Image (tube, rainbow, N blue to C red):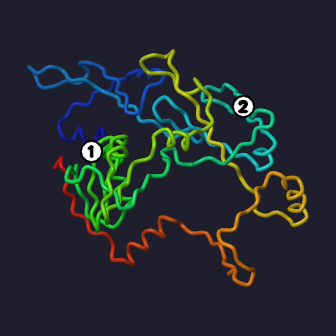
């Protein structure tokens, strides 16, 4: 609706100017209101005029609460021998970060919500009959996602149905019992998951607190090691010579002769697409949720 449309509808359109002050650290969706600026029918109280902050995407930084995230790339040489990066902050301040002498920057998980492996116990159950809900499906990843969303620590899978458990992780591990045909899945150890999610960061270099400007978030520098597209054989020989003492010997999974070995080709595959195709081949999933909170 524009000014002309409002005029044709019989409304009196007044023009006014407002100065909207955005405090430091204001979150996305922050509202600034001006009381009594909206006129109403005679006899009714005047309404408020509100401006809602919509945060624009920054080309380099992303924000989550008070924390800032910045992705930077390192060459393989920098990852192995050391690096120094200059970061221009949002306010123009230039920060210098560098590796410690002898430190090697290893590739880290690119998922900020990464977690350790779930613990799996074959022919095991715990608290049978004490279900926090059930889900008929052949997709175990869907069961794990249900646990994450509902804050559950595990489930027992029997035949084609998952039976969720409301007890804590420690109780599930302590009380598990043999049960033929059942498989118990327990959520990852939080400490191990925290180790998987560790990223390089600068403490106190994030956003200022909205209610307390003295409190600041952290700046996470997501370092991505860029590997060369290829290495010439002459250079590969030099690398083998330099790194020969650092490369562990490859242990064979089973003894055998060279004649028994089958050479296979590695290809690039999208694991999500692969999972989708598997589900299509077996007819998809059939779900009938029976959650205790419904």
The location of residue 21, given as percent across then percent down, is: 43, 20
Residue matched to label 1: 166
Foreground residue among 132 and 12: 132
**Alpha-carbon distance for marks 2 and 1?**
45 Å
Q: Residue at x 58, y 31 (%)?
A: 219
Q: Residue at x 51, y 42 (%)?
A: 192
The location of residue 11, given as percent across then percent down, is: 19, 34
Tell whether 275 sits left or right of 125.
Answer: right
Q: Residue at x 70, y 27 (%)?
A: 94
Within 10 Å of disc 1 (Cα), the crowding (few <14, some 14-19, many 20+) is some
Q: Residue at x 69, y 46 (%)?
A: 106
Q: Quadrant of residue 204?
A: top right
Element class at badge 2: strand
Element class at badge 1: loop
Label at residue 97 = 2
Q: Is residue 94 above or below residue 294?
A: above
Q: Is residue 81 above or below residue 202?
A: below
State which quarter of the image contains the N terminus: top left
Return the residue found at the far front: 178
Q: Are the residues at dot 2 and dot 1 in contact (C-beta closer than 8 Å)? A: no
Q: Quadrant of residue 220?
A: top right
Q: Looking at the image, tell me whether mark 2 or mark 1 is earlier in sequence order.
A: 2
The location of residue 243, given as percent across then percent down, is: 84, 53
The location of residue 124, given as percent across then percent down, is: 34, 57
Foreground residue among 151 and 111: 151
Q: Nearer the viewer, mark 2 or mark 1?
A: 1
Tell whether 4 sits left or right of 41.
Answer: right
Within 10 Å of disc 2 (Cα), the crowding (few <14, some 14-19, many 20+) is few
Tell whether 73 sits left or right of 15.
Answer: right
């Amino acid at each position: 609706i524009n000014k002309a449309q409002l005029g044709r509808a019989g409304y009196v359109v007044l023009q006014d100017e407002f100065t909207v002050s955005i405090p430091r650290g204001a979150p996305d969706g922050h509202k600034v209101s001006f009381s009594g600026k909206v006129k109403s029918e005679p006899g009714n109280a005047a309404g408020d005029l509100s401006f809602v902050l919509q945060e624009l995407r920054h080309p380099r930084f992303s924000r989550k609460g008070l924390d800032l995230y910045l992705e930077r790339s390192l060459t393989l040489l920098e990852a192995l021998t050391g690096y120094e990066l200059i970061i221009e902050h949002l306010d123009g301040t230039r920060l210098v970060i560098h590796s410690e002498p002898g430190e090697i920057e290893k590739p880290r998980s690119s998922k900020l919500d990464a977690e350790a492996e779930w613990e799996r116990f074959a022919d095991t159950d715990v608290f049978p009959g004490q279900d926090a809900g059930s889900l008929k499906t052949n997709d175990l990843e869907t069961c794990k996602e249900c646990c994450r969303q509902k804050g559950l620590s595990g489930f027992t899978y029997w035949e084609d149905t998952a039976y969720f458990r409301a007890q804590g992780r420690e109780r599930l591990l302590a009380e598990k019992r043999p049960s033929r045909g059942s498989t118990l899945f327990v959520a990852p150890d939080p400490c191990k998951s925290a180790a998987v999610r560790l990223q390089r960061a600068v403490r106190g270099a994030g956003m200022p607190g909205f209610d307390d400007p003295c409190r600041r978030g952290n700046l996470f520098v997501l370092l991505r090691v860029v590997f060369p597209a290829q290495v010439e054989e002459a250079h590969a020989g030099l690398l083998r010579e330099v790194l020969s003492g650092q490369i562990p010997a490859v242990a064979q999974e089973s003894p055998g002769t060279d004649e028994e070995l089958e050479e296979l080709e590695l290809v690039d595959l999208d694991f999500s697409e692969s999972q989708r195709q598997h589900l299509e081949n077996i007819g998809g999933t059939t779900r009938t949720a029976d959650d205790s909170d419904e």
